[in-house]
Image (tube, rainbow, N blue to C red):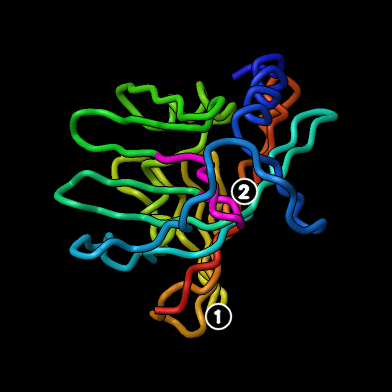
Amino acid sequence: MRARASRAALPALAAALPAFALVAGLAACAGPAPAAAPGPAAGIAAVPGAPLAGRFSLVAASGVRHEAWSGRYAFRDEGGLRQVDLASPLGATLARCEWGPRGARLSVPEGAGLRTEEGPDAQALALRLLGWPLPIELLPDWMAGRPGSGVPAQAATQDGSVDSFTQAGWTVKVERPAPGANPVRIELDRIPRGEDDPLRIRLRILPDPA
């Protein structure tokens, strides 16, 4: 992805998602009417070891642009069909992504409703609709504190209760209260690739206590 594509995509994301400053508190939401914040649904199991729900904060920066969002996430896995929902602190839908063997579907707010597009993989849809290449299909494994399958990853390192590894151009750091315990904090960083791709993304995930 070239620099001009990254800069052009960030305004599109700002139009699609309500912006929430991480240190400035809550702002008024744009998009569909507020709904209950996402949470685990009865009868739907999580990926083994992956948190079902929690809080997130995301910062995307490219050149002079700087966008920030925060809210709650919920992850579900039902018969191989995976779904992640993102909601603002006020409960408004920010995004919903579903993916499985037959492809992926991503929905984001547009006007008074939702814009939904489908494609062969979730990351391509994230780039098209959100403006940046989120590795959505790897997130469940990353939230569980392990590299995803099918994609090369550098050997994990461990420093006390913190595990870290790199995969798909991202650095993943997983903090646990004790070795082998469920993660309590996951930090994901996309490092800029150079002048042609200066986009940097920082995603922080705080799982709800089990």
88 and 147: which one is in front? Answer: 88
87 and 35: which one is in front? Answer: 35
Disc number lying in front (1 or 2): 2
Percent x, y for residue 111?
Answer: 56, 25
Residues under numbered marks 1 and 2 in contact, where contact means CB atoms less than 8 Å apart: no
The residue drawn where x is 49% and y is 48% is 86
Q: Residue furthest left?
A: 79
Question: Any mark on residue 160, and which?
Answer: 1
Query: Which is more N-terminal, label 2 or label 1?
Result: 1
Q: In this view, does 188 lie to the left or right of 144?
A: right
SS at circle 1: loop
- Residue beneath disc 2: 189
SS at circle 2: strand
* Kind of residue at badge 2: Asp
Q: In this view, does 72 lie to the left or right of 28?
A: left
* Kind of residue at badge 1: Gly
Magenta-tinted stretch:
87-96
To which quarter of the image does residue 205 belong? Answer: bottom right
Percent x, y for residue 13?
Answer: 63, 29
Question: Is 40 above or below relative to 193?
Answer: below
To which quarter of the image does residue 19 belong? Answer: top right
The residue drawn where x is 50% and y is 44% is 93
Mark 2 nearby-residue class (10 Å; few <14, some 14–19, many ≥20) = some
Looking at the rendering, in which quadrant would you find the N terminus? top right
The residue drawn where x is 39% and y is 66% is 51
94 and 112: which one is in front? Answer: 112
